[in-house]
Image (spheres, helix red, strand yellow):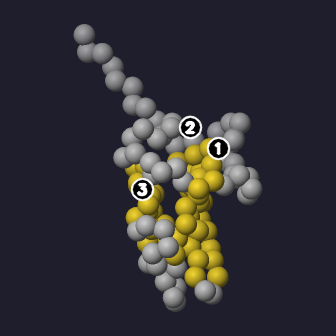
Amino acid sequence: MARVECEVKKSYPNPVFEWFYQVSSCEDDSYCDPPGDSWKPLPERIIVDPPKNQPGRISRIILPKNTPREPTFYKCLARNSRGSDSFIYEVLRYRRKCERLF
């Protein structure tokens, strides 16, 4: 499992969080910005803590081991009655190669 955490340092009232994702469309290993119009709601298999629409200062998603291995962007959106802010994470998953001993 992997965790991605989003924290708001100061806010009144506390925000509610919403998470989105999109598979990376970058052609190479250089820096890449995800397209702004391609965000999708998280799949059901990804756990959001605390659940959607519950105010707080921290929100995290828990990515199960069977999450696809392609590079994926995750967007955390924090919003309250005074405005909103977001942060984007790029998650890269690698498979560890085991060497044979015999």
Looking at the image, the residue that sits furthest to the left is 102
Q: Position of residue 75 (x, y in %)?
A: 59, 60
| Residue that mark 2 sits on | 70
- Residue 39, quarter of the rendered image: bottom right
**Alpha carbon separation for disc pair 3 and 1:** 21 Å
Give the label on residue 47, or none.
3
| Foreground: disc 2 or disc 3 | 3
Q: Are marks 3 and 1 in contact (CB under 8 Å)?
A: no
Among numbered discs 2 and 1, the one appearing first in the sequence: 1
The answer to whether residue 4 is left or right of residue 38 is left
Give the label on residue 24, or none.
1
**In the image, what residue occupies the spot 57% across and 42% down?**
71
The answer to whether residue 28 is left or right of residue 16 is right
Please rate how many residues cluster around mark 2, counting C-alpha atoms within 10 Å: few if below 14, some from 14 to 19, many from 20: few
- Residue 80, quarter of the rendered image: bottom right
Q: Position of residue 49 (x, y in %)?
A: 40, 64
Specify the quadrant that holds the C terminus: top left
Please rate how many residues cluster around mark 3, counting C-alpha atoms within 10 Å: few if below 14, some from 14 to 19, many from 20: some
